[in-house]
Amino acid sequence: MKNVYNFSWEDLGNLAEGRPNLGGETSVAIYRLMQFTFKDVLSKELGREKTCELFVKAGLLAGREFCRNVLNPDLPFDEFIADLKAKLIDLKVGVLRVEQADMESLNFVLTVSEDLDCSGLPIFGETVCDYDEGFIAGILKEYTGKDFTAKEVDCWAIGDRTCRFEVKPVEA
Amino acid sequence: MNSTQALNAIGSCLALAMERGLGKNGLVFPVECKEAEDDTFQNSCQNLQQIFAQMNESYRFAEALANGELKTEVSRSNIFAMPLKALQASLRHLTWQTNQVADGDLSQQVDFLGEFSLSFNRMIKSLRDKKSLEQRLKTITDVLGEGVYLVDTEGRLIFANPEAERLLGYSFQEMTGEMVLHVIHKQYADGTFFPPEGTQLGTAIRTGQAYNSDDCVFACKSGRLMPVSLACRPVITGGKLEGTVIAFHDITEQKKYQESLQTINALLEKQASTDTLTGIYNRLKFSKLLAMEISRARRYQSSMAIIMFDIDKFKEINDAYGHQAGDSVLIDMARVVNANVRTTDIFARWGGEEFMVIAPSCTLDQGVQFAEMLRFRVAQTTFSVPRKVTASFGVSVFRSNDTELSLTNRADNALYRAKGNGRNRVEAEDAEAFYHQAGASRPPTS
């Protein structure tokens, strides 16, 4: 076994061939089961902080791959966001909405409602969408070629009805 | 305070709120928790007090949202405010979307907001359709080989297509808002300015009438006056005049072509009616003019004399001095006679060395006198051949039943008699009878 695994989009497999009857979709509960059990085990092995950091990193990789393979990075910004929003709805990831977009400073405020990771969770008292933070930053990095940070400021798990992310470019 | 007293106080508080609303101070929890009779009741009071506080906060938050204040914050633990927070997020997003649409981003869609989504998305579709139509119209006007201006009801420029910019040299930016007619349509083709009351085009713009013209000129930025063919049509929306479309194209080449065509036609007309050697009318033109003069004389019952004359012994001149000298004699003869006829007379070469004069308003007697004057002038002229040149003349006068042929035949017969009687003389038609009847003396002959 290799020590390191390098993700490739092809590794997601041929779902039409592999799941001719069940298809390409599964339940949100099963997705969350996997994510939260990962979090459980990893946090006990590595600590909460490291676990969150790893989730952000994984989300970043997922966002970049998603942008490369599902989105069209050649579109102008407005059309790119419209396409992203439509794709996230089609894939039942969440309802992306833009609240603010400053194209000069590249500062954005985005919300995601009916989020795959957290909507409907009990109130934990802390944000839980670490993977989403990385996912959003990864998409924007792939689109603009610049590094971004996405910080979740509102989350269902702390009593909000929508997840809100403040997205900024990383200062050089 | 026991639990019964506490419940009564809470009940009174809620009844008052339901009757009068929350008011300025909101719901005020009426029980002092520390005074509760035991710990369990005290905990319950504290929970109820917290719910009162959350309800108050939610109410204020809802009020702020109702007033469009989208930056108001509410505590995270407030369970009543959660749907309002979702609404706040949606409104913030809609605000951003509306600004995007205002800036021309028509990719916006609203999802999962019920009827509002349907309405918003329908509006976006309508705007997209309109934009698509505008783009199509713009493409059409861009490629159209016709200048197009759109002006408002006062004549101020709203739109100009690239061809209009190219034709007149004014960019859309420098003409936007200008009174178009004050800039490009202020002069006649000869450069004089229009009178203060304006032009038909100006009237058409003000009154919303259709107008077409091929006789206008537009002033180019360079100062050149460009002849244009234009069509002007009103833009009417909902029965109200919104402006006017002026479509025009340069007809400089067309005008030049028309002018050259007129010149060519005039030249051809002249060639068709002129004797090429002498420059006077030829026989074809003479026949047309004679027919016209006969009609005129018949209609107004006026007199008209015909004088036919022939150069005496012209064949001898040709034989002795050559045809070129003969031609010179013909040219000189035409010049001499032409210089002595009236402006109202018609003078033509009949053929060979024969000439014709139509003398309107002349009786036979006057015609004979006129012919005699001409004969005399000819006889007095020095021609380019070394011999005396004379001519013989026959005169006839119009009678009401005359045709061209009968009139000219009588003049020809008279000419024949002049030749027979010795040449260099004038003979009138039916001369003896005429002079006998009129009691006039025969004019002198040579």
Image: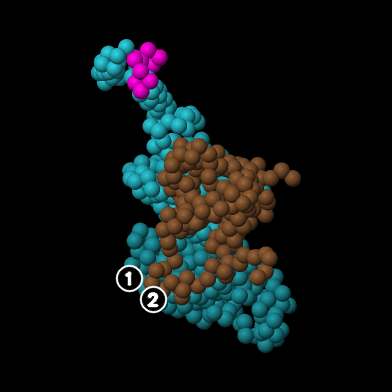
Chain colours: A brown, B cyan
Q: Is residue A47 visible?
A: yes
Residue B123, image x, y percentages:
39, 47
Q: Amino acid at mark 2?
A: Ser
Please tell me whether mark 2 sits on a helix, a strand or a loop.
helix
Q: Amino acid at mark 1?
A: Asn
Residue at mark 2 shares a chain with residue at mark 1: yes
Residue A163, image x, y percentages:
50, 43
Please tell me whether mark 1 sits on a helix, a strand or a loop.
loop
* Whether residue B401 is situated above or below residue B208 in the rendered picture: below
Whether the magenta-drawn stretch holds residue B33 is answered as yes
Q: CA distance from mark 2 to mark 1?
A: 9 Å
Chain containing the residue with disc 2: B
Nearest the camera: B167 or B242?
A: B242
| Residue at 51% in and 48% down | B105
Nearest the camera: B392 or B26?
A: B26
* Whether residue B218 is situated above or below residue B41 in the rendered picture: below
The label on residue B415 is none
Determine contact: label 2, label 1, CB under 8 Å.
Answer: yes
Neighbourhood count class around disc 2 (C-alpha, 10 Å): few under 14, some 14–19, many 20 upward: some
Question: Outermost residue, front direction?
Answer: B38
Q: Residue at label 2?
A: B406
* Whether residue A140 is situated above or below residue B294 in the rendered picture: above
| Residue at 55% in and 72% down | B268
Residue B153, image x, y percentages:
44, 40
Label whose residue precedes the other's in the sequence (2 or 1): 1
Q: Residue at label 1?
A: B401
Question: Outermost residue, bottom direction?
Answer: B319
Chain containing the residue with disc 1: B
Q: Which residues are magenta?
A: B29-41
The N terminus of chain B lies in quadrant: top left
Image label count: 2
